[in-house]
Amino acid sequence: QTSKNLLKSFYPQSRELLKFSVLSKQPMLNYSNLAPFSSLSKQSNVKNSNNSFLPSCSLKRFSESCKSDPNAPDVNVELNKLSKHCYIEQIPTSCLAQFGYYIEANGKAFVVDPVRDIDYYLKLCSERKAEIKYIGETHFHADFVSGHLDLSEKTGGKIIFGPGAKPEYSIIETKHEMIFELSDKIAIQLIHTPGHTLESCCFSVLEKDDQGKYKTLAVMTGDTLFLGEVGRPDLAVKSDLTEKDLAGLMYESCQYLAGLPDDCVVLPGHGAGSPCGKNIQTGTYSTIGYQKLTNYGLNNSLSKTKFIEILTSNLPTPPSYFFHSVKQNKGNIQSTKEIHSKTTPIKQEEFLAMTHQDSEVKIIDTRKNFLILSTGTLPKAICIDLDTSYAIWAGTLIDPNEKIAIVCEEGREEEAITRLTRVGFDNIVGYLEGGFEAWVNNKHTVNRISVIPNKEFVDILKNSGSSQFVLDVRNPNEHKTTGVIENSTLIPLIELEKNLDKIPTDRTVNVLCKGGLRASMAASIIVSKGYSNQINVVEGGLDKSVENGITLKSLN
């Protein structure tokens, strides 16, 4: 069913790039310019402004190349020019929509929220001939496993958390507005900002003037304040602490931040696409003044009651791995190098045993989505494109305690493993030796996932109506906002595996989401469980179906 036209419709950017190999008859594409289905994250392996290829861990220097909203002149600042007395670098990890920070003055560095793979931080210190004095954590992270313990062990840097944090390792006991000096001009101040969690804090960069008074240059806000949004209040709920209680604390924390200077640069812990906030604006940093204009969290005219109502309404279900990551961040964390040392190529015959339904090993096929739809996948594999929000989806759909085996495109094995470790996968047993090509050459079984052209799907639906089984795997808030196809079965992707008994085994199943990515993952989950009936991914998803004349039913 797959053809040039279908691939073009899934990837419009590929129209001038698609070529066919005379020998293989398979589509061959220039991958470098293709955008994935999902708009949640950018491809991690891209070229930066200096035209140098980014490392597989997708960390790069952002202080020169990234600006925020160009329409807001007070936002358009260069971090490393905020002060002649210090160097500030924002360090993004795009697959997590996460930002870490490096602040250096007089050869002493303060690192905030480092990811688990710490090589970049060590390299940065070496290049700049600096030493890490402090490692600050804005809270016990839920969306990724931090590298603070490994970094502390390698550099001697002291670990800092907000007041009340009780990890299983040694940290500096802190209090609100505690100051950590880096030089006679630059210091970092801890601001206790409970709300996302009880120990949540921000770190502000202070510069001392000639009169000995500190001015706040920037504030690293962690998961307290994002661009256009604030951190969700439902991840630290306890029997005696509700999400509304935490939202109330968040209100007070935001009021404190609103009192910082308007030109103070806001350096958030996450960007757009992170599940840590409901509606985070695009951009990498901003200012307090601009956020007062665009962020309800800093709106002084908003009452506390209304703030709580906004913050606690329509909160999406958090990915299941969040609670696993929090537990890991409170305890002793295995280094990524240890995990890599135990992860080796797996011979074809050994991997074949893992594809049997009784195997305890979970298989993730990380190849590009369009390749999987055109060539198929391994039995029992869940397909999660490495060039999308791979780590977040893996942690959402698979228990991080499971044993994991990976199918990769050649040369991307290390990246696939590293990004899984960031969300707490420690039991990665290895990757398929020779990849999918070797699997096919050895004539092993391949599971096919069909693609139905959108126009064909719409025509069938119009002609046969309720006889078609349509599975909509979008989130509940999307169902409510845009409506649904009449008689469709609504199961959010995050809940699909628990509801497979609702999927028929004797009828064609048409799976759709907004655009295609989640439907492809959903189809792979269904097929991985041994379903032999036809499972179709609806090309273009609901958006294209509406363009082609489908009428949606409102749930309101």
Image (tube, helix red, strand yellow):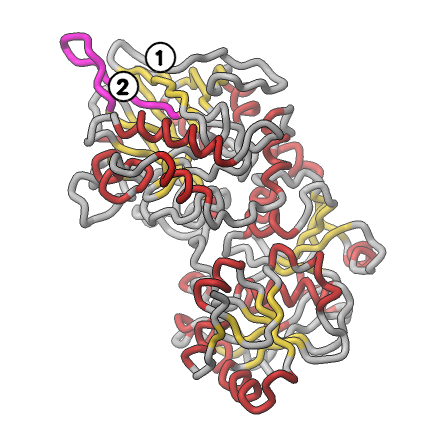
Q: Position of residue 105 (x, y in %)?
A: 30, 18
Query: Looking at the picture, which amino acid does disc 2 mark?
Result: Leu
- Tell which of 126 and 292 is nearer to you: 292
- Is 424 included in the stretch rendered in magenta? no
Q: Is residue 468 above or below residue 359?
A: below
On residue 206, which mark appears?
A: 2
Q: Position of residue 375 (x, y in %)?
A: 63, 72
Residue 232 horizontal side relative to residue 508, left or right: left
On residue 179, which mark appears?
A: 1
Is any part of residue 55 visible from this angle?
A: no
- Is 214 included in the stretch rendered in magenta? yes
Q: Earlier in the sequence, mark 2 or mark 1?
A: 1
Give the class, few, some or many, for how many residues have Cα within 10 Å of label 1's Cα (few <14, many ≥20). Answer: some
Cα gap from disc 2 to disc 1, whole angstroms: 9 Å
Find the residue positioned furthest to the right.
358
Residue 385 placement: quadrant: bottom right
Give the class, few, some or many, for how many residues have Cα within 10 Å of label 2's Cα (few <14, many ≥20). Answer: many
Query: Looking at the picture, which amino acid does disc 1 mark?
Result: Ile
Secondary structure, mark 2, is strand
Q: Give the magenta part as a residue range.
A: 202-216
Secondary structure, mark 1, is strand
Mark 2–mark 1 contact, CB under 8 Å? yes
Q: Is residue 485 above or below residue 150?
A: below
Q: Position of residue 470 (x, y in %)?
A: 61, 75
Q: Residue at the location (62% across, 64% down)?
A: 522
Q: Residue at the location (44% across, 53% down)?
A: 41
Q: Position of residue 19 (x, y in %)?
A: 47, 77
Q: Main secondary structure of the magenta part?
A: strand
Residue 528 horizontal side relative to residue 164, left or right: right
